[in-house]
Amino acid sequence: MRRLLALVPALVAAVVFLAGVTTGHISMDDWGYIYGCPFVKGGLSLANVAAAFMQFGYDAFWMPLTFISYMADITFFGGGWAVHHAVCVAIHAANSALVFVLLKRLSSVFAPEASPRETALACLAAALFWALHPMRAEAVVYIAARKDLLWTFFALLGLIAWTRHIRCGGGMSLSLATACCVLACLSKPTAVCFPFLALALEWAALGRFPRRLWRYAPMLATAVLVGAITLYCQSNPIGHERLDVFGEPLWWRLLNAAVAFGMYLWHVVAPGGIRFDYRAVFGGCPLDCAFALSVLGLVLALFAVSLRFAGSRLRAVLWLAAAWAVFSIGPVSGVLGTVNGDHAYADRYTYFPALAVSLVLAVAPLGLRTRLRELVTAAICLVVLVVGLDCMIPFTVAVARSYRDDYSAFSRTLAKDPDHWRALRVVGSEYCARLGRMDEGVAMLKRSLELRGSQRTADSLAYVLALRRAPGDVAEVRRLGAAVAANAALDRSGFMLEALGTVDLAEGDDESAARRFAAALRVPERAHSDLNTRLGLGYALANLGRTKEALVVLDALRDSTDGEVRFKAAAAARLIRNGRQHRFRAL
């Protein structure tokens, strides 16, 4: 019966997160990793699999196994956002079961005197706490974070095998652990920490520094190779802006990492402030700096006190938990290079490191005296059950649902950080496009551009202003698009060309409008609908008297899924065929 307990955290995690996921997605990386990726969107094939391994630096990462998993979704299940979400939830459920198994193995190493019932209950409570915590939501629901799910899956399998190797020896378990290390590194480069985790685990279990260090050589060689490839990918990305990996000074990277660690610890006990995309303040004091450093200082003080009064086994567990957290969060802390881009930190980075907390929750009570051990174990189980049912699970579901689209995710971010430039851009664009709150949206976009001079923000603002055309808007569009007006090749998304074409059409410069709309249709990195662009091109061609070309463009829009575009195209085509003279000026 106890062997089936591993299914409990798996089933509970699956039910909770299936209640939270939707059929939507986050445009930041979700699209680029799958349907915007040339070697993923076609599904599994020998050429695509080879490209996943050979395309060093696509979107600044090398993670071939993660890309192959997306291909498998498309080939075996037909693709679609709902399919990708379901697979992510399934991997998380499997990880939850593996966490229970690993904690049981570690409990038998560090607390062999505990009864099977006590061990099972403590490990079950700790596994549920990890699986259902709101900080897991980003890694599970954000499809682009599947790399965190996959590397954790292989790392857990590898550590389970490594634990068996420590206790029983044998070449099979050593080979399995090494293979899992390789697979984890192929899923996400963060797994380069695996050999150091294995070393810490063996050291803690044996109570001395491990011998036969040659066993670590294949794992360490894999970590070094993948680390070198990752450094190359970050410095020479494909389809992503070049990252200045060591651009920030060391003191800032260390400070930002300390603040991130403090906030991670705080969110473990008080997750109400978690959000998507924590903003980095380059060259200055990070957000929540004083508070986060205070939390980190308090935790370090408690850690020191615990080491002072704990027995030898508990000290070993505490040191292992500390090493687990530091080694696994290190590659994404930014200390070894600003690999986070413009993110200060992210909840998905804690998916594997947070197991350090569950390790302490599961193993520490089992090292107490018999009567006290029973009371503490029962108390932990009761707290996890009550807090989980009353607070944690509903909040986890709510956080998961906030990732249903860009607007929901970044609205939550903006509520916590009003000066988040990316959130201002995304929410402002949604205000203009979907909610009809044009003036508020324009104000948000202008504020975003003030905070961060992003070309994408400038493109969005110019496009919105071209459609609004309030006094001064046309001049602002001309100013924002001056460089693109001189060289159309600078616009790789098409937004600025469409904005300039819309303004040209409104002002009667039909030749320029037609040229810019045509150029916008040829951009290499379009990620938005081209329906309005084609409609504008049809209008401009009709105004120029090129009726045959105009009718070809407009008639092609008759099957458009956008009802407004379909109606406008049909009306324009009817006017042209009836020979009526009409100047089309507005989209």
Image (cartoon, helix red, strand yellow):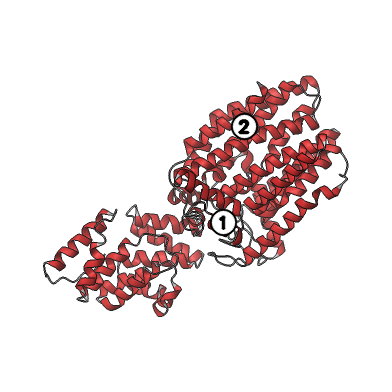
Residue 272, picture quadrant: top right
Q: Which residue lies furthest to the front in this view?
A: 46
Q: Which amino acid does label 2 sit on?
A: Leu
Please name which of the two marks, 2 or 1, marks the residue nearer to the observer: 2
Residue ID for mark 2:
128
Residue closer to the observer: 56 or 471? 56
Residue named by callout 1: 279
Q: Is mark 1 on a helix, strand or loop?
A: loop
Q: Compared with residue 433, is residue 160 higher up or lower down, i.e. above or below?
A: above
**Front position in the image: 131 or 472:** 131
The residue carrying pointer 2 sits among few (fewer than 14), some (14 to 19) or many (20 or more) residues within 10 Å by Cα, namely many
The relative height of residue 33 versus residue 459 in the rendered view (above or below) is above
Given contact means CB atoms under 8 Å apart, are the residues at marks 2 and 1 in contact?
Answer: no
Where is residue 481, by image quadrant?
bottom left
**554 sits to left or right of 404:** left
Labelled disc at residue 576:
none
Q: How many labels does the image show?
A: 2
User: In the image, what residue type sits under mark 1?
Assistant: Arg
Identify the mark nearer the N-term, 2 or 1: 2
* Helix, strand or loop at mark 2: helix
Name the spot of residue 415 as percent of width and height, x first. 48, 49
| Callout 1 crowding tier (Cα within 10 Å): few <14, some 14–19, many ≥20 | many
Relative image position of residue 315 (x, y in whole percent):
82, 37
Query: Residue 275 appears at what percent x and percent y?
Result: 54, 47
Q: Residue 80 placed where, x, y %? A: 44, 47
Which sits in the foreground, 367 or 35? 35
Q: How far apart are marks 2 and 1 (CA)?
A: 30 Å
Please give left or right for residue 371 compared with residue 274 in the image. Answer: right
In screen coordinates, is 222 left or right of 9? Answer: right
Who's the residue at 73% across and 54% down the image? Answer: 222
Q: Is residue 505 above or below residue 388?
A: below
Residue found 72% across the figure and 25% down from its top:
119
